[in-house]
Image (cartoon, rainbow, N blue to C red):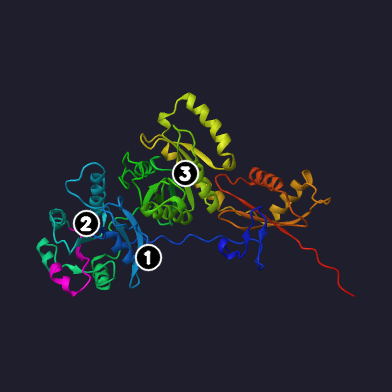
Amino acid sequence: MTDNDLTGGWSADGTWSDETEWELGDIEGAAEGEFVPVPVLAVVGRPNVGKSTLVNRIIGRREAVVEDVPGVTRDRVSYDAEWAGKRFTIQDTGGWEPSAKGLQQSVARQAELAMNTADAIVVVVDATVGATATDEAVARVLRRSKTPVILVANKVDDQKLEAEAAALWSLGLGEPFSVSATHGRGTGDLLDKILEALPETPREIIGATGGPRRVALVGKPNVGKSSLLNKLSGDERSVVHDVAGTTVDPVDSLVELGGKVWRFVDTAGLRKRVIHASGAEYYASLRTRSAIEAAEVAVVLIDASQPISEQDQRVITMVEETGRALVLAFNKWDLVDDERRVQLEKEIDRDLQRVRWALRVNVSAQTGRAVQKLVPAMETSLESWDTRVPTGRLNTWLRETVAATPPPMRGGRLPRILFATQATTRPPTFVLFTTGFLEANYRRFLERRLRESFGFEGSPIRIGVRVREKRGKPRR
């Protein structure tokens, strides 16, 4: 039984309101599925030729951020795809510009890295424009590659543009496949060709057999999420630049740490509330929330050299609301002096009191200081997130706790706690069956005692109250 099996919901005062009965007792959480490595397809090309639109068409859903502005995609972004029963990973990349400078140079490097690690490559060219100098430069590089290459002539919306597509034979990459990513024209035949080009297993497998735990790297813009991912992976997985908001899409990377494979997602920095965002920023905010919901543990990066901001607190609240395990990583610790440390402790006591249970790690993504300490913090948080307390042990603890500190009187009566059970894990969720309502302060007291007795470091826990309704007297 998982959270989705509960048909009720939590009210604002913490009471569980249910519509149907559910099974109680020892209910196991969902087991991790077996991790099976799949081949990787890289989609490359110059800016604004429709790479992200094609990716969305292939995966069958709108995941890659698409906007009618060149350069929206800046990182290598991975998505799961399937066609004709065969699974593979597709990597969307930023536009490839041979003469790019600054930020665009970093984007170009991401595309080159994707080409070097992929099992097959799709090169997208705008058929309405024809082969440009940039397209020819890409073709020269790929003609030397041993990786299978598929040339795609995009924006061929009708038969009239087939002649323009045929002109792309001049690139020397073989027959151009005419498609319209926007309308879906020709994408089925393209997918058949892609399956022919992809091997059964990827050429690069990060070594572990268990399913990787999913980690979301979240925080406000320019806090160092991409730098931390690059430091952990020992590779430039994400574009790093001193321009805030460089990451737009969540960047999915498999990284081996501490003898285990972890699936990290580098997310867009949250600048504004979603309702105030627009365009690519709006979609990036939605992707970030989706990435948190799909993760098991969230590592929230906070700039330790600056005061804790409202944005930092909003990100933590988002993680808290989704019920994910949480690690607070105070980044840029190399810039923190003694005076700032004292001030930071005061800010933590004042602003982060509600997440005292979260594990804290002081790191520097720039220098690599203590980044390896994130692994035991994540492992501890996930262990707590998965923890189940046996019903007998839980009720023994409850009787002792209530006997020592009874709940406060309410309406002249003392509510009795009849029974307790852990309804779910991920996060640990407890339901108390009572004869009367329990005040919020007493529920918080029980949460503190639960943590003292059973741990739950790094994981939120939820306590709901289910009040037994009084049965009316039978009519004569």
Going by the picture, which residue comes out furthest to the top? 339
- Label 1 or label 2, whichever comes before in sequence order: 2
**Nearer to us: label 1 or label 3:** 1
Up-down: is 233 above or below 332? below
Give the structural element (helix, strand or loop) at label 3.
Answer: strand
**Residue 61 marker:** 1
Residue 262 in view here? no
- Label 3 or label 2, whichever comes before in sequence order: 2
Q: Which residues are magenta?
A: 146-165
Up-down: is 176 above or below 319? below
**Residue 45 marker:** 2
> In the rendered structure, which amino acid carries the disc numbered 2?
Gly
The residue at which mark 3 appears reads as 300
User: Could you classify mark 1 by the number of other residues whose Cα lies within 10 Å: few (under 14), some (14-19), or many (20 or more)?
Assistant: few
Q: In which quarter of the view is residue 47 placed? A: bottom left
The image quadrant where one finds the N terminus is: bottom right
Going by the picture, which residue comes out furthest to the right? 476
The image quadrant where one finds the C terminus is: bottom right
- Label 1 or label 3, whichever comes before in sequence order: 1
Q: Residue at x 66, y 47 (%)?
A: 447
Residue 433 in view here? yes
Horizontal and vertical percent position of residue 300:
47, 44
> Is-magenta flag for residue 164?
yes
> In the rendered structure, which amino acid carries the disc numbered 1?
Arg
Give the structural element (helix, strand or loop) at label 1.
Answer: loop
Horizontal and vertical percent position of residue 276:
45, 50
> In the rendered structure, which amino acid carries the disc numbered 3?
Val
Up-down: is 365 above or below 157? above
**Residue 217 marker:** none
User: Could you classify mark 2 by the number of other residues whose Cα lies within 10 Å: few (under 14), some (14-19), or many (20 or more)?
Assistant: many
